[in-house]
Amino acid sequence: VLDFINRYAFLEMANDGFISLVAQQYDYLWADVENNSLFSNEAKMNLFNKLMRYASIDDLVKQNEDGLLAEYLRKSYYTNAFDCVQTDKAHQIIKHYNVHFLTLVEDRDSSNLLEFIYKNDYYEHNSHNIWMLLETYSDINIHDFENRIYTALITANIEPLISQIGEEIESFVFRCVLADSNTSESAESITLILNNGNVSEESKKKLITHNNTVFEDIHFIASAEHKNALFECNKVKPSFANINYYLTYNTLTSLDEIIVQYINANVQEYIKLLKGQNIIQEDIRIIKCLIASEGVDEEIWKTIFTEVKYSQYWSDDILGLREEQVSYLVDNKLFNFDVELFKSIGAKFKDMFKKLLCKYSADV
């Protein structure tokens, strides 16, 4: 019987009642078709299409009790599966099978099943389908959003797509936003995901490490943990304002391990800022913290000491500096001769007195 059905699948003829009879009488037909090597891919599609065209809805529902017809349809191009099938019947079959198509196909010039499938959310929320819908139904140029699918989605802001994705946001993030090539989401779109209570913490942590995006600032991110993770991953633009904000929202008075690691990953950027930036009141505590923290790269505190504009923030408390810092000041004669100060330095740092006498011999 299967051999005859296989050959019949290639016949070009009008409905002669045979397919209807097979659908009525041959229980679990598609299971035998899938498991029989007689049927090539072409034969399967030909037979499937004939079933869709000529079998009744009731028989098609019965034939799909094992779910195999729906699964075959899900993986197929619906333009082929429903070729010459009445549009209303195709709609009924999709509804009964509750199929979510793996691959969307543009067909607006023919049966326009795409419109029905899209409006009723009968498609998988994968990257191919989302890009295809954005290109078809939105005004954006998708080529301007390479490697940032969620940024494209929120920029287009079309319904029902935005709502459909919102209802399945965790799945969308996992499948599309965290796809290997999708590494350039905007800071705004990443913030939206980080602030979304329907996205798992696991996905949020992966998102932070996955993207190459550097944040200008992180004020709009709700969670302190997520903000800290961005600093840990060096995804925040180097600035005194961002260090100040980190200390503020973490209620810190000194630099902790996370921010020290972040600063040391951006040494040259901070040296440029120190040399070029005009000091504002909020920067003063950052300058003092950079001097006081033992873990900060020495090139940073050396830059602070050599820039005259910062001298007022350390010169009155030289004895509060670390020995290596005082030694650097002495080597470069960065503070003025003072008898009492020299005595105090010599008393605190026993090996420093001889160096003081050598460097400041003329003053002595």
Image: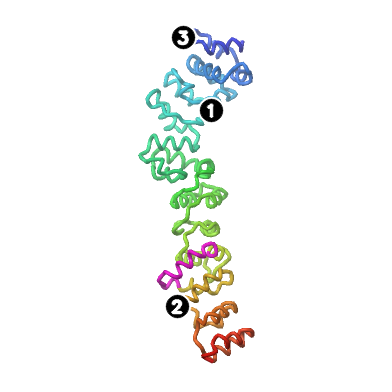
- Mark found first going from the N terminus, 2 or 3: 3
Coloring applied to the structure: rainbow
Q: Dot 2: what SS? A: helix
Q: Residue at the location (44% across, 59% down)?
A: 217
Q: Which of the two marks, 2 or 1, is nearer to us in this view?
A: 2
Quadrant in the picture for the C terminus: bottom right
Q: Which of marks 2 and 3 is in front?
A: 2
Q: For mark 3, does the 10 Å Cα neighbourhood hold few (<14), some (14 to 19), or many (20 or more) residues?
A: few
In the picture of the structure, the residue carrying the numbered disc 2 is: 308
Q: In this view, does 355 lie to the left or right of 148?
A: right
From which residue to which does the magenta span run? 263-283
State whether residue 202 is above or below residue 3: below
Mark 1 surroundings within 10 Å by alpha-carbon count, few (fewer than 14), some (14 through 19), many (20 or more)? few
Question: Which amino acid, by three-letter code, is at mark 3?
Answer: Ala
Relative image position of residue 323 (x, y in whole percent): 60, 79
N-term mark: 2 or 1: 1
Q: What residue type is labelled 1?
A: Lys
Residue 221 to residue 79: above or below? below
Mark 1 falls on what kind of element?
helix
Where residue 205 sits in the image (x, y, percent)?
55, 51
Report which residue position mark 3 lands on: 14
Task: Residue at 58%, 88% (x, y): give it.
Answer: 357
Q: Position of residue 188 (x, y in %)?
A: 43, 51
**200 left or right, relative to 88:** right
Residue 188 magenta-drawn? no
**Which quarter of the rendered picture does the N terminus lie within?**
top right
Query: Which of the labelled discs sits on residue 75, or is there none?
Result: 1
Q: How far apart are marks 2 and 1 (CA)?
A: 70 Å
